[in-house]
Image: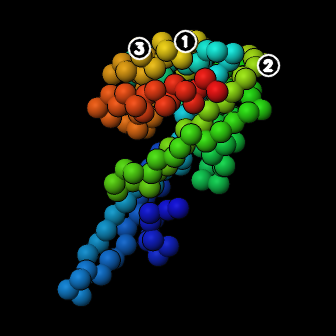
Amino acid sequence: MSKIPDYAKCIFKGEVFDTYQWQQELYDGSFKTFEMLRRKHSINVIALQGKDIVYIEEEQPNKAPFRGLISGGAESYEEDPLETAKRELLEETGMISDEWGLLYSDNSTPRLDWTVYTYVAKNCQKVIDQNLDSGERIKVCKATVDNFCDELLTNKSFRAFSLKKDIMTDINKDKMLEFKRMLRL
């Protein structure tokens, strides 16, 4: 559900962000211009292959190399989040899965209409070679659930969008145990 009112006007369309403005009546009857950014949804995929979690080591121009979840963005505002996740898994790893579940979605960033969906894909199978964008170099890696949760996910440099915020807030041990149990099912 969009945070931007239907009557807002798009004043700028960018490559990643669109800027919307609207007049909002205040409690005293006066009006003020409000503004918000919008971007297409993004996804994270926690891909399970056997008992291992698949993650990536990625390089992009003008960015430091990083490790993280399989992730990416929608190609259009209309693209279904699950279809985005399936497409990104296939492009970045060459894998598919017939067993998908939405772990959660997060749209809590103030002044930004943007949702990040985190999916779990079980029983991933490699079916083709990677099909990377020209600005990506991606190495597919694997880790056990314990190694992933205890070493990778807790590492400050590991990219996992909102997953880390949800699970790692003050290193919440109960949430981490619950997350590990869910991945092992």
Query: Which of the two labelled residues, at mark 1 and mark 2, occupies the earlier sequence position?
Result: 2
Q: Give the tally of numbered discs.
A: 3
Q: Nearer the viewer, mark 3 or mark 2?
A: 3
Left or right? Give the position of 66 relative to 126: left
Residue under numbered circle 1: 143
Can residue 79 be seen from the camera position used here? yes
Report, in whole angstroms, how far the alpha carbon at label 3 lies from the one at label 2. 29 Å
Report, in whole angstroms, how far the alpha carbon at label 1 lies from the one at label 2. 20 Å
* Image location (x, y in percent) of residue 87: 69, 34
Determine whether label 1 and label 3 are within 8 Å by CB. yes
Left or right? Give the position of 104 relative to 153: right
Above or below 12: residue 172 = above
Residue under numbered circle 2: 127
Residue type marked 3: Glu
Residue type marked 2: Val
Query: Which of the two labelled residues, at mark 3 and mark 2, occupies the earlier sequence position?
Result: 2
* Image location (x, y in percent) of residue 124: 72, 22
Mark 2, residues whose alpha carbon is within 10 Å: few (<14), some, or many (≥20)?
few
Q: Nearer the viewer, mark 1 or mark 2?
A: 1
| Quarter of the figure that contains the C terminus | top right
Above or below 17: residue 4 = below
Report, in whole angstroms, how far the alpha carbon at label 1 lies from the one at label 3. 10 Å
The disc at residue 151 is 3
* Image location (x, y in percent) of residue 31: 26, 81
Can residue 73 be seen from the camera position used here? no
Mark 1, residues whose alpha carbon is within 10 Å: few (<14), some, or many (≥20)?
some
